[in-house]
Structures are given as C-alpha cells and as structure tokens.
Image (tube, helix red, strand yellow):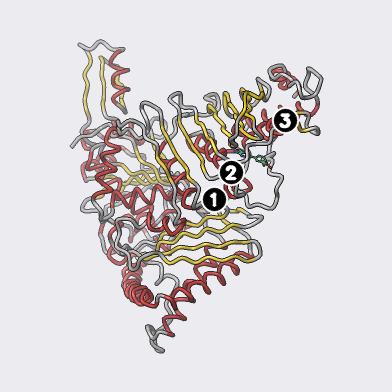
Amino acid sequence: MPEEINVTAGVGSAPDNASPSAFYGAKDIQVLEGLEAVRKRPGMYIGDQGARGLHHLVYEVVDNSIDEALAGFCDRVEVVILPDCSVSVRDNGRGIPTEYHTGAGKSAAEVVLTVLHAGGKFDKGAYQVSGGLHGVGVSVVNALSSWLELNIKRDGSEYRQRYERGVPVTELTRVGDSDEHGTSVHFMADDEIFSTTEYSSDILKGRLRELAFLNPGVTITFEDLRSESADGDGKPAQVKTFHYEGGIRSFVEYLNRGKETTFKPPLCVQGARDKTTVEVALQYNDTYIERVFAFANLINTVEGGTHVSGFRTALTRAINDEARRAKLLRDKDANLSGDDLKEGLTVVISIKLMEPQFEGQTKTKLGNGDVKGIVDSIVYEGLKVAFEETPEILKPIVDKALRARQAREAARKARDLVRRSSVMNKLDLPGKLADCSNRDPSACELYIVEGDSAGGSAKQGRDRGFQAILPLRGKILNVEKARLDKILSNDVVRTIIQALGCGLGDDYDSSRLRYHKIFLMADADIDGAHIRTLLLTLFYRYMPKIIEDGHLFVAQPPLYRVQEGKKIAYCYSEKELRDITSKMDSKRTNIQRYKGLGEMNPEQLWETTMDPENRIILKVQVEDAILTDELFGILMGDAVEPRREFIENHAREVRNLDI
Ligand code: 0RA
C-alpha cells in the first residue's frame, strides 16, 4: 500500500493557509487512498467505464447544482461540452464554501473535491438528489478526471483551484472580486479510465430536459461546441434551453406530443405528508401502450417501487368509485381492473422523501414501505377532487377502459392458443425453427434471420449443438400501432413467441426462456434496418426483461470480403476496408461487397457472424428509458413530422445507406 501512496504524494502542494507541513499528513494520505480506490475500481462508484459511466460524471456534477436549486439557492445551470471534449457545469448557487476547514487542514472546497462522500451538505434538512443513486460526490468526478478546474464565486470574491487526477496542483486562490455567486466545475474525463470519452449530446439533453421538468423554474442550458457534434446535424452549435414552468404537467404534454389525447390538459395531483411530497400528472392517449415514468428525489426509478404501486391502487380505486357514482358503470358491471386502465396511459410520478431506499438490480427501485400508503391516499383524494371539478374527463377514460377490457378478453383467447402450443414440447415448436440439441437455455443461442435464403445458409453453417435458427418471412407487424390481440394474431410474432417459449406482456416468464442469447440477423441495408427496428420494438414493448437481462444481441455481418492470394480478410466498416486495402497490393486484391446475408455461403456466414470465437456482436441495451421510448415512438408511431426531423438530424450518422 504505502508504495502506491508515495507516487502521488509529491504532486500536491500544501496550501499557504493549510497545515504548515510541506508533507502530507495522515489525513491527506487517507484522501489519496480514497481517490486511488476510486481510480482502481471506477465501476463501484459510477457503474462502468464505458459511455454510461462517462455520462454519469456529468450527472454527478449537475445533481450537485440541482441540490442547490432544491435548497432554493439556484435557478440556472449551464452545461457545455467544449471542443476538446471537456465538460463545464456552471450554476448560480451559493458556491462551495471556501473557508479554511480547521479539522481537515484545508479549504472546505478542497474537502468537497477530494474526500469521498463529503458532498458537504451540512444542511441535513433538504432533499438531496446526491443522496440517492448518483450520490457519490464530486470527489469521484475529480478522481476520474485527468484535470479539473474549480471556480467559485461567493462572499464578494472569485476563487480558483486546479486538480490533476484528483490531486490539487494549485491552492484554492482568490483571483478577484465578484458580486456574483455560484460554482463552476470544468473537467476532462480521464482517457486512462474511460474506454470512450465521446459524449452523446442526445443522452445529456435527455437527462437535462428531464431535470428541468422535475424542477420547474430552474433554467438549464446545454451547448455542444464540438465540431463533429454527436448531433451531426452540421448546423452551428446552438444553446438549447430547458425551462418549464408547468413542471411534470409539461412533461406529460411533452411525452404525448403529436398524439391524440382523451382530454387536455393532463390531470395533476399533488400533496405532502410526513416530509414526503407527491406530484403526479397523467393523461390518456390513443395508443395501446402504458408509460409510467417515476422519480424519487429526481432519480428515475426505472424498476418502479412503492410509489408506483401506491399510484396504481389509487388510480383504480378512484376511477371505479367515481364511475359508479356517475353511473358510468352499472351495478352489474364488474370493476375496472388495473390492467383495463393501463391502455394509453401516460403518467409521471415525482416524489421527494427524506431517506430514500433504492433497491433492485440497478438500484432504481424505491423500497420505502410507508410511501405506498402516502402516495395512495394523496393520489386517491386528489383524483376524486379532480373528477368532481371536471366530470367530463371521466367518461372517455371509462369508455376507453371498457374497450380495453373487451380487447383483453380477445387477446387472452389468442394468447391461450399461443401459450398452449408453447409448452416445451418439440412438436409444438414452429415448423421453420431449426432447433439445437442442447436443452440448457443458458448455453443456447437463437438466430432470428431475415429471409429464407439467409436462413438456409445459417442452418447449414451453424453449430447445431447450441445454435438454433429461425428464418422469418412475411410482414412483421408494427407493434407500436396495434393492440395485443392483433399482435398475437400476426404469424411472425407468434412464431417468435413460440420459439422463445417465455410468453409476453404480463405473461412473460423468464424461467421459460429457451435461449439466453438471441441474435437479430438482418441485412446491412435499409430494409434490414427496418426489420430490425420492428423486432426491437416487439422486444422493447412486450419483453423488455429480455433486454434488461442482457439476452438480446444484434449480429454484425461483414460488409466486405477482401482476398489477396491466400489471405482473406473481412471488413465490418468502410474504415476497416480502407485500412486493410491500403496495406495490400491493390492490383492483386479482390474485393467482394456483401449486399445481403444471402450472398454469403454457409462457411462464410459461420466464420464471420456466428462463430463465437470470431463474430462481432452488439448487445442491445437501454441507456435511457425515456429517450428510447421517445425514439421508438418517433420511428414507429403515427406522427410524420418528428420522424422527418429525426432522420434529418441523424442522417449523417448512417454509414451504410443503401436504398
Ligand atoms: C457544500 C456546501 C454547500 C454547497 C455546496 C457544497 C455546493 C456544491 C456544489 C457542486 C456544484 N455546485 C455546488 N454548489 C454548492 C452549502 C453552502 C453554504 O452553506 O453556503
């Protein structure tokens, strides 16, 4: 241990106003050990060292600014990606305290920036985002940045300090007068730590927009000054401003933009009990999909939790009670069920509580037991009042739920048919499926292949021990636009569901999944992309657990085969082709371009795309639930304008456009 400390110990200088010793004391050594621990196991603090962890750095700093806003001291946060890919987050909060901290022997700011979990909020009374999921503190960002420049304005002065890999390389220095207040953290993610340092401006904008909805009154701006911005729209960078006085009501309007809604504006309920505040906004649209976005202390609780259960109970009870009172349900009608009320529901739930308990695989499930009852009673009372004030919105909701119930009956019948034949009986598997001989799902792979000819090559090329092939032919239904009964009557969907064996929707059962690796294999052209998107939509909307559990992959067939004499190489991108051919004698090379999977013979398909030793595969992951939801809505939904906009903005990212 001590050897490692020595390496960094000499880098920092002891500030004038700090301990008189020129050497690090015991406390500093603790600090260095702490930061070293972060650099050794970044995953423990920020999730991973890929794109997700990288974006996490920005969220961590922004969350600290948002904490200032929650405490009532900040109404502006500015996020800028600079041309060198560093990120600056500036707020007009109180500014991190700068005074000398006797106990620590350094400035309070240096404590906040170097000591783990010294988020330093001494006012325990406030709700804190940084007490939650992210909550690792700016010191972690500091430790994982090759450099970080801190700028603080407070008490009439402006201060500055620079750190390198977490270690202060200057003192916190007063650089001038200022009558402003606030903090600016400018950092460069360390490329020794992160496998990528390329931010996605869409992902950052998604979270910043979300934060602006959740904190009405706070203005959050975003600017991407990189020349090749991830936006790729070729337009000069512009400042994007997020500011929503309407809060989560505006959030629901945003989620439902371009869709027909049963009533306007969204219904809103809010209340508080025992230091827990509850806010809910909801609206029904003309789709068949339910979208529940729930937040606890501004953290997106993707896995749900007690606040979501409380909401569901209240919604069902309030609508049934009011529908009976208004004689929209007759005495002989059965109560509407929670499922009847899901179709087309868009809801945002935001609660703030003192000591949130985050559970679940990704620590995004709220566990506080008392929250269920609190949310239930606040939402129930609030909805009753709302339905009394605007009785006209109740009828369309009840009518829609009654239609949903009928359709669900039809769906149940269709599903029973599918289910009965999906019991693990080889005879009931779809005829086109070339199954593998292994019966252990964790060892088995299913290739869902577009087209019969590619399917034929795949069947011949595969290792039949553990690889099954399901060729698809015919139209894949766009599940974004259809209801479950119709979805289940579609041949292609049924074939897939039967082969997988795990059911779908509420019926999904992971223990019945027959393959733990599922590959989507389609041509590298526009049609292939379309088919892939349709399949992804089916999985995302009806079997999201397959994606969450990491079972879904996209196979990556090569685009070119290059041969020079006996040497053969496969290229998966244009760049690879350039790199490889530049090293070859072009007169003697033969370049074959694969227009589709069908052009590969079985051996080639095995070698390049199916052999676990050689193949390149892409795991399907959902980085940001709201962004993904939006994307599927845009790509597969009814409205044309947002789709055109998306395609215009992203056209430059499409590399192998082949119409
Ligand atoms: C510690 C104490 C206080 C504020 C902060 C830290 C703080 C941290 C960050 C990080 C980014 N922006 C920030 N703004 C504030 C309380 C300050 C006080 O009591 O005056």
SS of the residue under disc 2 = loop
Q: Which mark is residue 299?
A: 1
Could you tell whether 562 is left or right of 227 in the image? left
Measure the alpha-carbon separation of dots 2 and 3.
24 Å
At which x and y percent is residue 524?
Answer: 26, 36
Measure the alpha-carbon separation of dots 1 and 2.
8 Å
Q: How would you rate the neighbour count of disc 1 (Cα within 10 Å): few for under 14, some for 14-19, many for 20 or more?
A: many
Measure the alpha-carbon separation of dots 1 and 3.
30 Å
Q: Which part of the image, by quadrant, shows the N terminus?
A: top right
Q: Which amino acid does label 2 sit on?
A: His
State the residue position of label 2: 134
Q: Which part of the image, by quadrant, shows the C terminus?
A: top left
Q: How would you rate the neighbour count of disc 2 (Cα within 10 Å): few for under 14, some for 14-19, many for 20 or more?
A: some
Point out the tag, 1 or 2, that comes first from the N-terminus: 2
Q: Which amino acid does label 1 sit on?
A: Ile
Point out the tag, 2 or 3, that comes first from the N-terminus: 3
Give ligand 1's quarter of the image.
Answer: top right
- Is the Cβ of the residue at disc 1 closer than 8 Å to that at disc 2? yes
